[in-house]
Amino acid sequence: MKISPFWLLLIWVTPVCAQYTLNGDAQLESDGCYALTQAQNAQLGSLWSDVQISLDEPFQLDFVISLGANDDNGADGIVFVLQSNGLTALGTGGQFIGYDNSISPSFAIEFDTYHNPATGQLNSDPQNDHLAFLRDGVTDHASANNLAGPVDMSSAGGNTEDGLDHIVRFDWDPLTNTMDAYFDCDLRLSLSYDIVQEIFGSTSDVWWGFTSSTGGYNNLHQLKFEQCFLSVDGPHDICAGEAVTINAFSTFNNPNLTESFSWSPASGLDDANAQSPSASPTETTTYQLNYTDACGNVNTDFSVTVNVEAAADASFTLTDFCPGDANAASNIASPGGSFSFNPPVTDGTTIDASNGSISNAIEGSTYTVEYTLTGNCPTSSMETVTIASEVDASFSFEDFCPDAPVAATNIANPGGTFSFNSTPGDGASIDASTGFISSAQAGSTYSILYTSSGNCPSTSIEEVRVLLPEDASFNFADFCSGEANAPTNIASPGGIFTISPPSNDGASIDELTGVLSNAQAEATYNISYSTSGDCPSTVSLQVYVLDCNVEPELVAISLMPNAFSPNNDGINDQFGLISTQQFTDYEMLIFDRWGKLLFSSTDQSSAQWDGSQKGEALAMGVYVYFIRYLDAAGEQQEHKGNVTLIR
């Protein structure tokens, strides 16, 4: 038990908050209630606090003990001990009360209920149940280790094995080295003794607890903290204007020691000093019990809360919503009630009783929802809710070629927002208002999400594929004037051949076969081929018409092949100008189809292109070349066209 400080430096120790180690026959009977021995012979038990106490600081310890109901054949008692042996200390039973020289060094306060009169072999006990201060495990009062007493345990003398609860208290003052022991509110023994220096050799932190035993006689020896015999009921729930009785319960058993009860605050109580007053607060209130035992020790650890429910308010809000939207009730004045349809519905719509969320609602329908509060103050209220219609988010998106992107069409409800359903990692972007895709990559498929606007927006998803450009590559070998000629290796037949720009020397080309007619000797023609499928492309090659009537050595140039395969097989592994002459101001450039420069060289004889960029092999496809130089006559010549990289 706890007590108010008796002087300002007193430290208030609260035993009920500690944890305890039990040894021997000691048992936990209930919360805060321990049996150190049963009413059986040859019992031996000890209880030690798991938290040490400092003898450098003042303290006050309060307990309730019960020494049993056997008088003539009862034994042996309880000993309070300060010791440095640890949490397993347990002495000898019988007359030693669980305290012997195995628990040394130690200081003890003995509550002895059995008369062991002989000196030396026994304890030199007085006739009455008595109290004494001992040290180092010696219980013989004739010994020098008997520091004070023995005195009658009770100020009234006689028997304390009366089956009643008794209040004990120990006060320690380190300034005066004084230990006081109280029994049932009376100071029974006081000792001025330097416990720290004389017993513990300057060690001030010690273990504290109790030992107890029985021998040929016995008693039930109990140690009780407040939660063992003191409790309250509650909490209580009432409606405004109602009353409830709050109760304090005490099983403290000693009619000679009168307890008292009071409650605070006093507001709403019919008698704040009653053990069980009637409470009718106007708002939720926690009443603290002020329990005072016969010795004036005050406990304020117990309280009762009376929850006051205001006049029941079942108001709530349930707004109109769109199908599929979250739609739980809001602004619920008093949570914890139950939602339902009133009247019940038969169209398959359901409602969550806990939050009012409606599922499987029919578009355009109106429902009446009732919210009911149960408990002490039941009531209900009703709201109607209408389920609006969703805005149609349908649209169309056609597949397209990389160089001809398109926007969304057939948008059922314009004004919404387009986005990628899953963000691509290839740099493609989309216009939120039109769905126009930029930087689309050939061969990719994009998932497009459209979210309509309005009160009930919805979403729809369409996939669009970026078509692969058709392969317009072909070969066209140089030929002698007057010889048969036609393109070969046409990757995608069915396209159109043209001379670009048109020839002004009378040469013409068959657009279906690519055959050149009226080609002039030593003339160069730029032949373009355009495919005719869904994703057309165009490739151009330069064809040189040889004058096969001149000496071979006068033919200085053999133009580049229109395809090569850099696979290190020794055949067409590189691409470049092949010539019997060396030219000045030579330059060769290689571009991809979008005009990005991939390779450049000014070395005619050795710097050929191997199909890579900065050491990284490029993908198979059609690339654009541009070559210029000064010929033997000092005239600038230019060649450009397409070359197919094959892997």
Image: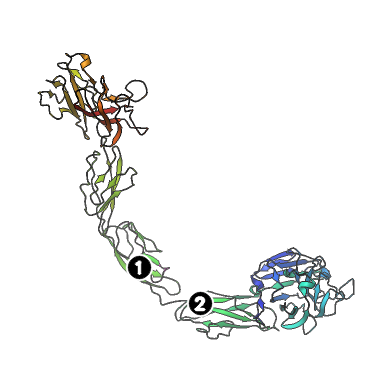
* Lower position in the chain sequence, tag 1 or tag 2: 2
Residue 373 falls in image quadrant = bottom left
Residue 256 belongs to the span the image colors magenta: no
In the rendered image, the vertical position of residue 288 relative to residue 536, given as above or below: below
- Residue 160 percent coordinates (x, y): 77, 79
Question: For the N terminus, which image quadrant?
Answer: bottom right
Left or right: 225, with 356 as reference point = right
Q: Is residue 1 visible?
A: no
**Going by the picture, which residue comes out furthest to the front?**
634
Q: Which residues are magenta?
A: 320-337
Q: Which element carries disc 2, helix, strand or loop? A: strand
Question: For the C terminus, which image quadrant?
Answer: top left
The kind of residue on which mark 1 rests is Glu
Q: Looking at the image, which is closer to me, 99 or 620? A: 620
Question: Which residue in the protein does label 1 denote?
Answer: 370
Question: Which residue in the protein does label 2 denote?
Answer: 306
Residue 6 falls in image quadrant = bottom right
| Crowdedness near tag 2: few (<14), some (14–19) or many (≥20) residues, C-alpha within 10 Å | many
In the rendered image, the vertical position of residue 193 relative to residue 455, given as above or below: below
Observer-side mark, 1 or 2, equals 2
